[in-house]
Amino acid sequence: MTQGEALAILKTGANVYLTGEPGSGKTHTINEFVGWLRASGIEPSVTAATGIAATHVGGMTLHSWSGIGIAEALTRADVDRIASKEHIARRIHKAKVLIIEEISMLSAATFEMADAVCREVRRVERPFGGLTVILVGDFFQLPPVSRGRQATFAYASSTWHDLNLLTCYLTEQYRQDDGEFLATLSAIRSGEVEEVHYERLMSRRIPPSEIPGVREVPKLFSHNADVDRINAGELAKLPGKAKKFRMTSKGKDSLVEGLMRGCLSPEVLELKEGAAVMFTKNSPQGRFVNGTLGAVAGWDAAAMPVIETKDGLRITAEPMEWQVEEQGKVKASISQLPLRLAYAMTVHKSQGMSMDAAVMDLSRAFEYGQGYVALSRVRRLSGVYLTGLNERALEVHPDIVEKDRDFRAASEAAREAFAPRPDSAQTGMSEAEKLAMQKQFVKAMGGAWCHTDRMGVAPWSENVKNRKQKTSGLPGRLAETLQAARDGTSLREVAKTRALAVSTIVKHLEELAEIGKLTRTDFAHLVPLRIIDEIHEALATAGSERLSPAFHALGGRHSFETIRLVRLMKNQE
């Protein structure tokens, strides 16, 4: 299933399990869905199974959101106690769409506990009290962690069954562009590793004398102690005194603590000139992504580090924010340079990253899927440096292999059910029917239909017409974004001013263009002049309205949002 097909299904309001191989665009697709919801006046509750995943999506852990905390079981009295907490009850009552990222790392027990609390608060005996639920993740990746015992995957719970989920299995690949390496990863995933795949990986076995230095290529470890020891040791070898950059925070202590635990940048970041670093966040302007490697080349006039990437690009690193949002409002935030020392990191913290290269020792892999997760972080086989490899590193859980076949079959059935229907066919769905479902979903959620897509501009719904608007005659949300765009100096600044996602800001500008209320001068200053021609050329070469070919032609140097803005500028000429 393509990202576009999955997005169309998500917009109908169905309960959905969105999955796919690493690098298939799950996060990008869910971000597009969240942007569409917000543009329609529907604020989703965005959660994740872990703190790290929560920081990537600007949400909080499901444990915190639902009030279950670290509990591994709840009695009836426990559920009543949690449901009686005013802030928990208010949060769950207001919720309309619940998104849970990294569902593979959530145990069946935790999944069912969150469900029980939602049912109790909302007083509705349906899964999660009748919320629309979107689950995102890949069960071949890191499994749930439970104290002292093997946890059961969420898909084994009765709640999963009761949700009647539509499965959207993304099949396009956006991380690996090395065909042989991709085939090897697919063989591991399907449990069909053959001698040719093993030999291909062993061709990257590096003797100790040829292992790249940690200053050149990061090492992946299983334990934090190894990572901390190597990073501190390598920094100490560099001459001069380290500069310290301290994290700042705003908001409720408990939410701030959760953000700090999940943030890949440390609370106190120590750097020296020459230090190997890795960016820990995606740049709104597309200058770097989570996983971009480089080294500290010096300091600017404000004493901020200047990073020279592996591609020779020099970037001044400035503090960025990680936030917890709830019902469209920022409840807590932390600010730090989006950097960490890159000599070593754990496999666990690498999840979600795309890495150019990594040294990894898989000779002591002990858990199903551990090797697959480590290997799938890297874009090409040439970037893999193995110091060891055992059989377990190439194994995935046999139960998941079997379940994955079910997920693929379910996804194909969903794709066929929503595919454009020829006049003579009995299956499929017309565009008018899908549009009607999407409109009904927005109406049921209390939103305002104002969606624009390839079918054209849908008419403003009556509730939009009757809402209080600014003197320009635009809906308030669009008028505010337009003014922020005119006043802002960067896309990130506009998003921060409006307390919205960057993708939502771009979506607003596209809507303004569609209704003839946007000029090129309103927003052209948000895109650095030096990158416009490069993106124009990539869009022209791609020869398609689809952004993915242009994104990959540009090597991922510029974000989808930046490419969309340049495309919009071209259309305004």
Image: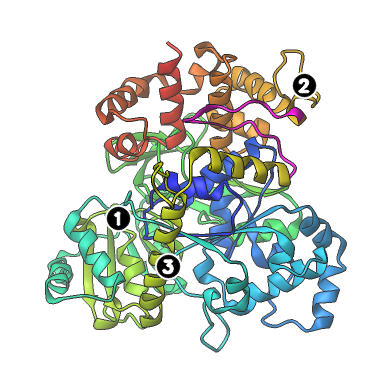
Taking the image as shown, residue 93 lies to the left or right of residue 314, namely: right
Q: Residue at x 76, y 54 (%)?
A: 252
Q: Nearer the viewer, residue 425 or 210?
A: 425
Q: Quadrant of residue 375?
A: bottom left
Q: Residue at x 85, y 75 (%)?
A: 80
Say which label, 3 or 1, has the lower sequence index: 1
Q: Residue at x 53, y 30 (%)?
A: 506
Q: Which residue is mark 3?
A: 407
* CA neighbours of label 3 inside 10 A, class few (<14), some (14 to 19), many (20+): many
Q: Which residue is mark 2?
A: 469
Taking the image as shown, residue 268 lies to the left or right of residue 529, namely: right
Q: How many marks?
A: 3
Say which label, 2 or 3, has the lower sequence index: 3
Marks 3 and 1 sit apart, C-alpha to C-alpha, by: 41 Å
Figure check: 323 above or below 300: below
Marks 2 and 3 sit apart, C-alpha to C-alpha, by: 45 Å
* CA neighbours of label 2 inside 10 A, class few (<14), some (14 to 19), many (20+): some
Q: Position of residue 483 (x, y in %)?
A: 66, 19
Which mark is in front, 3 or 1? 3
Q: Position of residue 364 (x, y in %)?
A: 31, 82
Q: Nearer the viewer, residue 143 or 203?
A: 143
Q: Position of residue 117 (x, y in %)?
A: 76, 70
| Magenta stretch holds residue 100 | no
| Magenta stretch holds residue 450 | yes
Q: Which residue is mark 1?
A: 215
Q: Residue at x 44, y 50 (%)?
A: 428
Q: Is residue 255 visible to the viewer in this orientation of the structure? A: yes
Q: Which residues are magenta?
A: 445-462
Taking the image as shown, residue 556 lies to the left or right of residue 122, namely: left
Q: Looking at the picture, which amino acid does disc 1 mark?
A: Arg
Q: Is residue 249 visible to the viewer in this orientation of the structure? A: no
